[in-house]
Amino acid sequence: MTSLSDLAVAVLTEPDAAQKAAKSREAADRWRTAAGTMEIGSALPPDRPARPGKPPLLPPAEMPRRRGQSDAARATLLHAVQHIELNAIDLAWDMVARFTEENLPRAFYDDWVQVGDEEAKHFTLLADRIAELGYSYGDFPAHDGLWEAAMATRDNLAARLAVVPMVLEARGLDVTPAMITRFGKIGDEKSVNVLNIILSDEIGHVAIGSRWFHHFCENNDLDAEKTWQALVQKFFKGLLKPPFNEDARSVAGLPANYYHPLSVPSLRKETKYTKF
């Protein structure tokens, strides 16, 4: 009988980006339909997920700038988000398959299946919008920074929770409102609508990461704030970069006293966003 881990590995080993998103949504639907009868299982995930032949992956410093209002400029910016969403699909299913020996409740898997489903939804929404602009996934370069964090934390559940949802995905809460404003100023309401959906869902994803990180700390008699800071300093390269969307982060269960001490002092300031 197929297990949840089997479904997760099937997503991770699918090289075609659109098919990966489709398999992610199908796997989530099968898990929910099983209504508690499917086993978690213990299929071993690959160290690196399968990827299509394009886009070319460049170091972050070599990524082209995304400026202007042309269809190509807008598609390039949305493509960068889409690439993040593709990585996020794999990160969610890797979380499902990699930590099956941690004696976690089924609710943990319910949450990360939901994340995988929603990341696939985001990828598809962006694919549709980019297609309307005349482009498709792989038409622009991308970078590989997200999976570097996954590799660094592949043997440490607490570190994975601290770094991936609570640092990397939390960064999306900081930068997406500016993208929404940018598209809004040029009247691109279709892109605004897609980004608003993504931002709303990503608050929930950060909240899931925060909830399970605090669950881990409570079960192991650890001070959550100090443990989070120590793990981020060990497993995340560099300082956290403000400005921070403190309202959205707070809603997601990530207090400012966690990340402010690890941020760049000269840039630190409280930033208020009224729409998230």
Image (cartoon, rainbow, N blue to C red):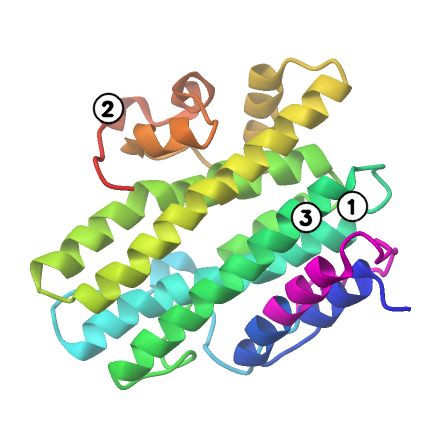
Residue type for callout 1: Phe
Q: Is residue 221 above or below residue 95?
A: above
* Earlier sequence position, callout 1 versus callout 3: 1
Element type at marker 2? loop
- Residue at (47%, 20%) from the top-left corner? 258
Residue 50 visible somewhere in the drawing:
yes
- What secondary structure do most residues of the magenta stretch adopt? loop
User: The N terminus appears in which quarter of the rendering?
Assistant: bottom right
- Could you tell me residue 15's position as x and y percent? 63, 78
Q: Is residue 22 above or below residue 202?
A: below
* Earlier sequence position, callout 3 versus callout 2: 3
Q: Residue 272's image quarter?
A: top left
In the image, residue 249 lies in the stretch drawn in magenta: no
Residue identified by numbered label 1: 99
Residue identified by numbered label 3: 110
Element type at marker 1? loop
User: 168 left or right of 101?
Assistant: left
- Residue at (59%, 80%) from the top-left corner? 19
For the residues labelled 2 and 1, the Cα–Cα distance comes to 36 Å
Instruction: Provide the residue span drawn in magenta.
Output: 25-49
* Earlier sequence position, callout 2 versus callout 1: 1
Q: Residue 45's image quarter?
A: bottom right
Q: Is residue 120 above or below residue 72?
A: above
- Mark 2 nearby-residue class (10 Å; few <14, some 14–19, many ≥20): some
Residue identified by numbered label 2: 269
